[in-house]
Each structure stands twice: as C-alpha cells, then as structure tokens.
Amino acid sequence: MPIEQRGVDTIPEDERTSGPRDLISILLGSNLCLGVIVFGWLPPSFGLGLWPSVTAIVTGTLVGIAFTAPLALVSLRTATNLSTSSGAQFGVRGRLVGSVVGLLLSLGYTALTLWIGGDVMVGVLSRLTGLPDTGTTRGVMYGVLAACTVVAAVFGYRLLLRMSKILAIGMVVLLAIGVFAYSGDFTTAAPPETAYLLGSFWPTWILAAVAAGLSGPVAFITLLGDYTRYISPRRHSSRKVLWATGFGLLFGLLIPQLFGTYTALAARAGAEYAGPLVAASPFWYLVPLLAAAAAGSVGNAGLMLYSMGLDLDAIVPKATRTTATLVAAAVATAFVFIGSFEWDVQSAMTSFVLVLTAIGTPWAVITLIGYVRCRGRYDADALQVFNRRSVGGIYWFRSGWNLAATASWAIGAGVGLLAVTTPFYEGPLLTLTGGVDCSFVLSGLTGGLVYTALTARRSPAPATAVPAAEEPANA
C-alpha cells in the first residue's frame, strides 16, 4: 500500500471514493480502545454509581453528537480538512486558529491513548511473564506503541480505514468477552472511599456529563473532515453522511465508555484505572486484554496522529505530511512520559478535556454558523491560498484574517476558561453558576452571539473563484 501523499490540499474528485459505511467503520473501529474506555471510568472515580454514571455519559454524548456531527458536512463540500475549511469564516490565515485547536486536541488524546494502553500492557505482561512494572518498562512500552502508531499514521487514510474495519469487529468481540470476564465482581455502587468530587450529586453529575460524555464528540470537532473529505457529495447525500456520522459517533463512543464504567465498578477502580483493571482480570482474559490494549491503542492513536500531522502541515505549509507526522509523534510521546511520571491521571484527564472543550467549542460554533450562512457552498480553490503561499481570494478578508471571527472565538474561549472548574484551576465565573461547570455552554453561546452580532449586516461571500496573486517574500 503506497504512502498517502495528500496533506491539506483539495482532494480530487476521482480520489473521493469513500462512503458513509466507511465513515461508520472508522468512527467505530478507531474508538474501541483504552484511550476512550478510560473515560467511562471518570464518573465512578468522581463518586458516582452505575446509573448516575450511565445517564451522565449517555446525556453528554447525545448533546455532543447533536453539536458536532454537522461539522462533517463542511469537508464534504470543501474536499479538505476542517481546519483549512474554517478559512471561509476565519480567513485563509485565520484558519490557523482551527489548526492549533485541532493540534492540541489530537496531541492530548494521542498521549492519553499511548499512556493508558502502555500502562495496561505492562501490567498484563507483569502478571503473565513476571516482567517488572517499572518506569523503564513503561517507557519502553510507550515507545513501542508510538513507533507502531507512526507507521499507521504515515501510511495515511487508506491503511487507517482498513485497520478500523478490522478493529470494529475484533474489538467488539474482545469487549463482549470482557463483560463476562468481569461479571463476577461487578457492583452498582461507586468505588470505595470515593466521595462526590464536587461535594454534592448534581454538580458532580454535570461534571461527569461534560468530562466523560460531551468530551467524546467534541474531540472530533476538527477530525471529522479528515474522513469526509474523501466522500464525494455527487454520490452521497448530506443526509446520509450526517446520519452515518451520528451513528458512528454514538456507538463508537458509548460502547467503549460504558465498558469502562462497567469494568471500573467491577474492579473498584477509584483513584486509578489501569492497575485495578489488570488486577481484577481473570487470568484467562489477560491475553485478550493485552490484544485489546495493543491493537486498539495503535488504531486510535494512529488516527489522532494522522490528524496532528495534517494540522501541523497546515501550520507549516513547507513541511510534508510525513515530516509533520513524525514531529507530532515525537511531541506526543514526550507528553506521555511527562504525564506518566509527573501527573495524576484523573486530574490530568479532567483538566485537559474541560479546558480544550472550552477553547474548541466557540471555534466549532462559528464554523457551523458560516456553513449555514453559505448553505454549504465554498470556493475550494480560494481556501488553499495560504498553502500556496499566495494572497487574495474571497476568503482573504484583512491580510488573511477575519478579525470579527477571530475576536469572537477569543472572547468565547476566554469566557469558557473563566467558567471552567478543574482539579488544578477554578474560574471566577463559577460563583455565578453555583459552582457548576457551564464552560461548554457559555463559551459556545458567547462566541456564537458575538460573531453573529459583529457580522449581522454582512452578506456571506459567494462561492465564486477569485484569482490569487503570488505572495511577495515580505508578506
């Protein structure tokens, strides 16, 4: 299989051969991994029992899908990734906002997947072979997983799609066996000695709905276009693509997260997940658990690393996608080492998803408003001006930036950060929301309302080509 040569350039029509079923496969297969499963452990670790955990995850996931899934239609129309597509609202240079948001999201989730997958693999091998569970062995395992992930990401979309189709079947079987394996110790009560994280039920439940449920779909706000750009709108309707996105996200996220909740309760996993998960596993399930940790981690992290390479390629147009992917892999692996040896996993995960959700949501809202205003009609060639190191086009705005969109995003993200609550930081706006984290809602509403107000009298740019001039050296 040849290495994919496409970066964030426009995908030609004859290469857009994927369909809605492929989209479901990649969203389902790539998410059946420990990096997503571990989010199901968060509600029990916050002090919630079975049904509060399940309702929080399901509610948050459904809300997130309703908000996130329409973004898949943008790249269906532009034939490039979502960060580049957002240039229609932010400007061809202002789209760097989306590239940075996407890079941070993918970086965090790649590191998390390698971290949890590596820890479980070391724990399993320790029980099976007596391998010492030390910092050195964990470091080696992180490196092995990272190397396998790089290979998958460098080969690109076609290989990742094939892997996802296999994982969609194989991982469902392994998780189904796991339900039986952990059934003997299952309890509906929260793990011992885990009081409500925020002191009372409802604030803790809302935190779980955002951190465990909502964060799953929001992680895809810049990723969905990586797949739908390979789907042709001439052969597949927007409605089918939208339903496929929703279906893939729903089952691709709920199956692993609910498995995570189930196993967390069975293993009495309070302050940590990987260790109790391995310790509570019957000996006969250790090999399937090892296979799930290895294959699922490579599949999920490979897809995230692929997206990181595209976003870094968008930020540095001179870099090839392969070079950008290798650099991104090195940075993600470094984060794994720092996180594993310096941070508490629960605090790190919670802080990461809440902060990135607050920052990313207003960008997604502004991009969706733009899609509705232009009715899905874009000038694909004008979106590539920055990649060609040119100037001009209908999305040039002011020196390549739409100041109204950029300011709206910054204001929305700022409000979100002021309203967030994490183990490391609490925003001052929490006093106005009764201590409940409403950062997702406030950041999205603020960014969307400010953008609508600033651009209310402007008509959307028509999707007609405007010539672009070569950019001078000092531009």
Image (cartoon, grey):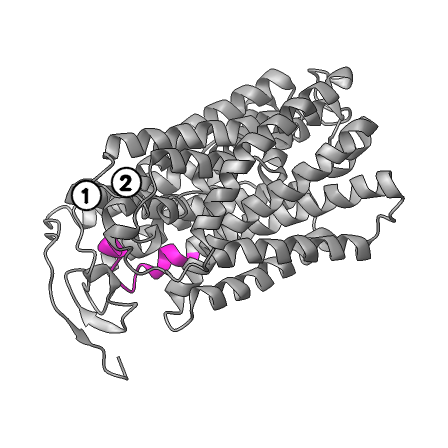
Tags 2 and 1 in contact by the CB under 8 Å rule?
A: yes
Q: Is residue 267 magenta?
A: no
268 lies left or right of 26: right
User: Which of the two discs, 2 and 1, labels the residue nearer the N terminus?
Assistant: 2
Report the amino acid beneath label 1. Gly
In-front residue for pair 19/409: 19
Q: Circle 2 sits on which residue?
A: 73
**Residue 468 occupies quadrant:** bottom left
Question: Disc 2 versus disc 1: distance between alpha carbons?
Answer: 8 Å
Residue 228 seen in render: yes
Residue 278 in percent (x, y) is at 78, 34
Q: Main secondary structure of the magenta part?
A: helix
Residue 425 seen in render: no
How many residues crowd around disc 1 within 10 Å: few (fewer than 14), some, or many (20 or more)?
A: some
Q: Residue furthest front?
A: 1
Q: Circle 1 sits on which residue?
A: 376
Report the amino acid beneath label 2. Leu
475 lies left or right of 426: left
User: Which region is colored magenta?
Assistant: 87-100
For the image shown, how many numbered marks are present on the structure?
2
Q: Is residue 96 magenta?
A: yes
Q: Secondary structure at mark 1?
A: loop
In-front residue for pair 13/141: 13
Q: Residue furthest right?
A: 130
Q: Secondary structure at mark 2?
A: helix
Q: At 87% from the left edge and 43% from the top edge, which residue is drawn?
A: 129
